[in-house]
């Protein structure tokens, strides 16, 4: 299989060199094992996977003996770590012993198909000892063989007025996906069907002790119809027939298994004393998977259903934002800006760093823009004040151009070109 350079590579190398333990998480089949094997020299590591039944059973039956037997003079890479939680506390012991022996870095690289928050035993055991990274499916830039980081350039770079070739949006969305189907699009439906069956048949039981995994299908369909909208939990529970406890557990599993993610509402003290809605917004980590869940063909939606295509386009941008910030140094936070009692002043995404400096991104499935399309960003700029670095309307047209104080019209091509 052809290898696509992953823009997470340099960050992974740096974190492995700086921390005793690194946890690389991400959706099943997003390329974690391939990234690790391509990034780190094979002669300097000990690679194991708990997808191998013999190793998994050995670690479960004698976790202390298993961890004690790991080489002390090299980096131990353990794939699919979430399958054997029995070793979590013993890995902490191994890190502490390594520190006492004068080796406090590059001890363990763990990979897993579960969000760290779904593994509280690992998170609690490794406090202060672990760096957490998330690998996503291919970004548009990676497929284009570009190392461009869209968020990084918006944050630090200078924009210049120019024209670009109009993007083929369905083609770009279709290729920014799981490696297997990006490289072999003809297998898309069959591959995604097998992917979902694996999650329902194994991960749901092992990770969340879910007894009726088929109900997750119904939940995914309900959530898929609400992509980009404020998530009203009561409506989803009514539609799926779930009680609150079951709904929250199953939704948490969808997030933990990297099928979906939620964007928090922006809500901070501000100089205009505005209040903000408290509802989250729901997105799918992969837009092709979203189309599969809803049994919708991307090209057909693009041609016949512009309203829903707008939701798919927003979902694609949401996933690209997450891919970009995951590869950047430092910590970033994503929210949506939605003042109470100000209809039409919502901004799709606000990306903030640890100091509160912010980028605002509005998404428009349109090839042309006018001043009215920047009203939401203006409201956001006026609320954030000096913390507002830049606001953009990301659209499908051809011209990158300024539209006022710190506001720009930006073609979607800038995600990868």
Image: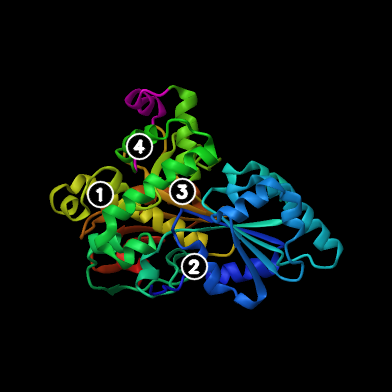
Residue pointed to by mark 2:
34
Q: Which mark is residue 310?
A: 1
Query: Eyeballing the image, is 83 above or below 404?
Result: above
Q: Which residues are magenta?
A: 228-242
Toward the viewer: 128 or 318?
128
Across and down, in percent, residue 225 comes to 29, 38
First reached walking from the N terminus: tag 3 or tag 2: 2
First reached walking from the N terminus: tag 4 or tag 1: 4
**Cβ–Cβ under 8 Å for marks 3 and 2:** no
Q: Dot 1, crowdedness within 10 Å: few (<14), some or many (≥20)? A: some
Across and down, in percent, residue 281 comes to 40, 40
Q: Residue at x 65, y 71 (%)?
A: 45
Across and down, in percent, residue 403 comes to 32, 61
Q: Quadrant of the N terminus?
A: bottom left
Q: CA distance from mark 1 to mark 3?
A: 22 Å
Q: CA distance from mark 4 to mark 3?
A: 15 Å
Residue pointed to by mark 4:
217
Front label number (3 vs 2): 2
Q: CA distance from mark 2 to mark 4?
A: 29 Å
The reply to whether residue 185 is in sight is: yes
Q: Dot 3, crowdedness within 10 Å: few (<14), some or many (≥20)? A: many
| Tag 1 secondary structure | helix
First reached walking from the N terminus: tag 4 or tag 3: 4
């Amino acid at each position: 299989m052809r290898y696509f350079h992953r823009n997470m590579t340099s960050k992974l190398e740096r974190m492995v060199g700086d921390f005793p333990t690194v946890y690389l998480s991400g959706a099943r089949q997003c390329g974690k094992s391939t990234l690790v094997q391509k990034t780190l020299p094979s002669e300097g590591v000990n690679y194991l996977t708990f997808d191998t039944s013999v190793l998994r059973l050995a670690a479960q039956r004698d976790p202390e003996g298993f961890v004690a037997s790991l080489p002390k003079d090299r980096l131990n890479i353990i794939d699919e770590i979430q399958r054997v939680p029995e070793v979590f506390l013993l890995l902490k012991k191994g890190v502490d012993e390594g520190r006492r022996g004068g080796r406090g870095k590059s001890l363990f690289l763990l990979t897993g198909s579960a969000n760290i928050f779904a593994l509280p035993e690992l998170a609690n055991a490794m406090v202060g000892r672990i760096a957490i990274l998330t690998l996503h499916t291919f970004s548009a830039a990676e497929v284009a063989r570009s190392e461009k980081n869209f968020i990084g350039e918006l944050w630090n770079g200078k924009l210049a007025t120019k024209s670009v070739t109009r993007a083929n949006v369905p083609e770009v969305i279709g290729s920014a996906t799981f490696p297997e189907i990006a490289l072999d699009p003809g297998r898309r439906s069959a591959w995604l069907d097998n992917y979902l069956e694996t999650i329902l048949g194994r991960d749901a039981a092992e990770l969340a002790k879910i007894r009726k995994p088929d109900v997750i299908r119904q939940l995914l369909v309900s959530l898929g119809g609400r992509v980009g909208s404020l998530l009203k939990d009561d409506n989803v529970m009514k539609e799926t027939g779930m009680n609150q406890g079951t709904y929250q557990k199953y939704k948490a599993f969808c997030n933990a298994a990297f099928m979906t993610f939620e964007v928090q509402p922006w809500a901070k003290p501000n100089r205009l004393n505005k209040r903000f809605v408290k509802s989250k917004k729901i997105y799918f980590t992969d837009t092709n998977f979203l189309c599969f869940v809803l049994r919708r063909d991307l090209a057909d939606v693009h041609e016949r259903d512009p309203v829903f295509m707008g939701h798919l386009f927003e979902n694609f941008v949401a996933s690209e934002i997450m891919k970009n910030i995951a590869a950047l140094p430092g910590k970033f936070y994503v929210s949506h800006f939605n003042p109470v009692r100000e209809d039409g002043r919502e901004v799709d995404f606000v990306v903030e760093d640890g100091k509160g400096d912010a980028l605002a991104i509005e998404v428009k499935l349109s090839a042309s823009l006018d001043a009215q399309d920047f009203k939401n960003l203006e409201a956001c700029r006026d609320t954030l004040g000096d913390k507002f670095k830049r606001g953009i309307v990301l659209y499908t047209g051809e011209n990158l151009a300024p539209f006022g104080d710190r506001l720009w019209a930006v073609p979607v091509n800038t995600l990868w070109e």
